[in-house]
Amino acid sequence: MKISEKQLAQVNDRIKALINADSFYGKKLKEAGITEVRTPEDFESLPFSEKKDLRDAYPLGLMTAPEEEIVRIHSSSGTTGKPVIIPYTKKDVEDWATMFARCYETAGITSKDRIHITPGYGLWTAGIGFQAGCEKLGAMAVPMGPGNTDKQLEMMTALKSTVLCATSSYALLLAEEIAKRGIKDQIHLKKGVIGSERWSQKMRDRISKELGIELYDIYGLTEIYGPGIGINCEYNTGMHIWDDFIYLEIIDPVTGKNVPDGEQGEIVITTLVKEGAPLIRYRTHDLSRIIPGKCPCGREYPRIDVIAGRTDDMMKIKGVNVFPSQIEEVLGTFPEISSEYQIRISHLDGKDTMRIYVETTGDNSFADLSERIAAKIKSAIGFTPIVKVVEIGVLPRSMKKTARVIDERFD
Ligand code: ZN
């Protein structure tokens, strides 16, 4: 997937605005002596924007349009350092609602639906994005925000909400509560629009089954409008990305080079028409891949896979980039083992070694199990790990996935 002529023209327009505003990116371009891009190769050599650049611009250094045109700000709360503040013009707010309404439409949601919105309102881009898209579509918004499960369920049953917008964990909590109270017959939900983080297939199946709904993954981040820049369609073959508003690339997070379509890497986003705070080649640190080919739904919008994790999770072993999610995916296909596993990476005799410990459930014979798992992992990551099968309960139980990977090479 290469950037188109039209998208290049849009980038050049944004480059002009950034240079005129003398923003951090405008300065980067000036230093590099760049005033425009003519080819996809020019574009791929533009410097990246990083979260740190955005923090350094605190409070309003990202503002690229005249102040009188700014109608709103949003902010992402960082766990470290200063927050990032993103200014929006009237057009930015409208564009975002247009994209979000398109997300709902792609999920088969119509003006007849009643949309129960549980993400938070305020500085966040969450709640208000779900609401603006809903109103643009003409559906009925039920602006709940998070928390107060009693009230949530009361409104959901009284109003006969048909769509639930939530994080995966909140959707699961509500699903479990509905099951516990035995009120499933009073629930009218048909679809769930779930903020896209990495969540397991097991969790997906559980929410979908308990609530009896179809689930849709919606993608986005505060730095780039907010949620609503892409969603999966009814064929569930990845999330369609609205490339008339943003251009999305996948890069190797180590080398910074673009990877071929289909290969996993870091999502990098360029806003094509944003006025308040345009971003060029913003590194999201989210991992995914472009899904090659056309979707059976006929939509021309490119697709990315569901988010596989964060670049911070990446391991470099034998010169190959490996993500825990790739291993997890393979392990998930073996009914003979539990959901627990541990990866140990060591460096012996000048070679990297990867050991994967898995637990047998004890329900099945596990003859050749190590070899079968090792072979399947090899086909996923390109080299053969050592797989050790242990008895159930032997591996440490932890909610943190970092505890699943132990890198002993740098001790
Ligand atoms: Zn599609």
Image: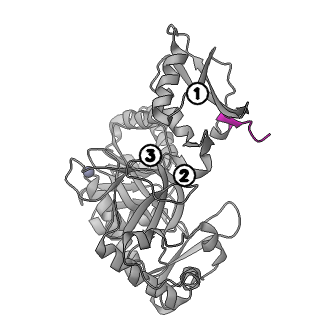
Disc ID at residue 153: 3
Report the side of 340 relative to 329 (left or right).
right
Residue at 25% from the left image edge and 52% from the top image edge: 108
166 relative to 13, above or below: above
Residue at 24% from the left image edge and 60% from the top image edge: 111
| Magenta segment | 403-411
Q: Which residue is mark 2?
A: 147
Figure quadrant of residue 269: bottom left
Q: Please, what is the three-letter code of the amino acid marked with disc 2?
A: Gly
Q: Please, what is the three-letter code of the amino acid marked with disc 1?
A: Pro
Label 3: element kind:
helix
Question: Mark 2 or 1, which is nearer the eye?
Answer: 1
The verdict on residue 255 being magenta is: no
Tell which of 189 and 32 is nearer to you: 32
Among numbered discs 3 and 1, the one appearing first in the sequence:
3
- Mark 3 residue crowding within 10 angstroms, few (<14) / some (14–19) / many (20+): some
Among numbered discs 3 and 2, the one appearing first in the sequence:
2
Q: Position of residue 262 (x, y in %)?
A: 38, 48
Report the side of 358 relative to 227 (left or right).
right
Tell which of 401 and 380 is nearer to you: 380
Tell which of 170 and 153 is nearer to you: 170
